[in-house]
Amino acid sequence: METLFISDLHLSEERPDLLAQFLAFVEGPARDAAALYILGDLFEYWAGDDDGDAPLPRQVAQALAAAQGRGLAIHFMAGNRDFLIGPDYARQAGMTLLPDPSVVELDGQRLLLLHGDSLCTDDVAYQTYRTQVRNPAYQAQFLAQPLAARRAFIEQIRQKSEAAKRDKAEEIMDVNAGAVADVLRQHDFPILIHGHTHRPAHHRLDVDGRTCERWVLSDWRDSAPYLAWTGTGLEYRELR
Ligand code: LP5
Ligand code: MN
């Protein structure tokens, strides 16, 4: 059976069309798969698991839990927008939380999975911000605030992030080649799969004389793309 990989759906109340595509994906291609890996940014943003009671997250959780009930193994790795998804929501959605990075083995092939933001080391301002918001003490302080205050704070971050991105060169927001080589070396040269950059491509690269592969997942802005492990290899597909 196949294993599917998706990321960067950025689901939000503003895009009911994307939610519909996601539900069609879960009811369609994911129905015949053994496992689904969601590699981050499933949601446009996540303010805490008490935000999961809103209609959209609830619909997503219901669809995923039903798929899990039919036998689909669902693994969720956090992205830079939904890293506050916790055990409560994961339980509701029938998914296990996967650390970033993680190595999984499918049919004897080792696959290294990341969201991808940790590889963007040239984006120094982002990495400084990331260190701060991934700090557990900082997160606990944030989560102790009322939901409305958290939403307002996130809105500020989003505006600052959008303004900051306008001033950044495109290359800065892509992965750093040295960071990619390091992570491949550290994990003994598996196939690398990640999202985040919204630059879908199958790269072949040389690291320490070894030919490696890097598969970049596509975002869901205009369509519903996914990557499939067929049992012998990977291939890009799209929901039709
Ligand atoms: O997501 P994308 O691709 O648009 O941009 C990312 C980086 N931006 C972000 C911010 C998110 O998009 C939006 C916020 C999500 C909120 C989640 C919950 C937050 C809870 C916080 C408390 C625990 O991730 C962007 C990268 C881009 O990817 C490409 O890699 O460039 O990074 C930035 O733009 C960051 C800026 O350069 C610097 C930081 C600006 C915000 C400062 C806010 C100050 C508050 C202090 C918080 C520590
Ligand atoms: Mn991302």
Image (cartoon, rainbow, N blue to C red):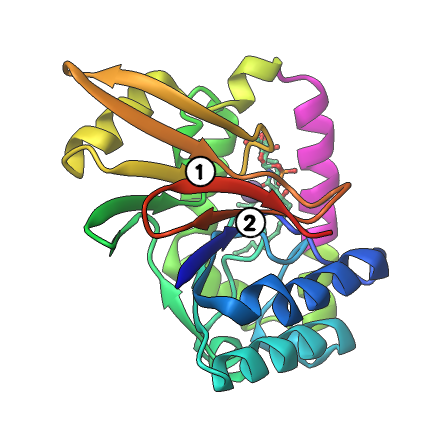
Q: Which mark is residue 116?
A: 1
Residue neighbourhood size for the residue with mark 1, other residues' Cα within 10 Å, grouped as few (<14), some (14–19), many (≥20): many
| Residue 66 rendering spot, x and y as whole percentages | 58, 84
Q: Quadrant of residue 25?
A: bottom right
Q: Is residue 102 left or right of residue 159?
A: left
Question: Callout 1, which amino acid?
Answer: Gly
Q: Assign a secondary structure to mark 2.
A: loop
Start-end of magenta stretch: 154-168
Name the residue at 75% across, 39% down. Answer: 159
Q: Quadrant of residue 190?
A: top left
Ligand 2 contact, mark 1 (Cβ < 8 Å): yes
Is residue 86 positioned above or below 14 on the image?
below
Q: Foreground: 90 or 21?
A: 21
Look at the image and tell me in which quarter the N terminus lies.
bottom left
| Residue 40 rendering spot, x and y as whole percentages | 51, 52
Residue 195 visible, this angle: no
Real-space CA distance between mark 1 and mark 2, rounded to the nearest whole angstrom:
10 Å
Q: Is residue 134 left or right of residue 106?
A: right
Question: Callout 2, which amino acid?
Answer: Ser
Name the residue at 55% across, 49% down. Answer: 7
Question: Are the two marked residues, 1 and 2, in contact with CB atoms closer than 8 angstroms?
Answer: yes
Name the residue at 69% across, 49% down. Answer: 224
Q: Foreground: 50 or 20?
A: 20
Is residue 167 in the magenta section?
yes
Q: Is residue 83 left or right of residue 18?
A: left
| Residue 204 rendering spot, x and y as whole percentages | 35, 20
Q: Which mark is residue 7?
A: 2
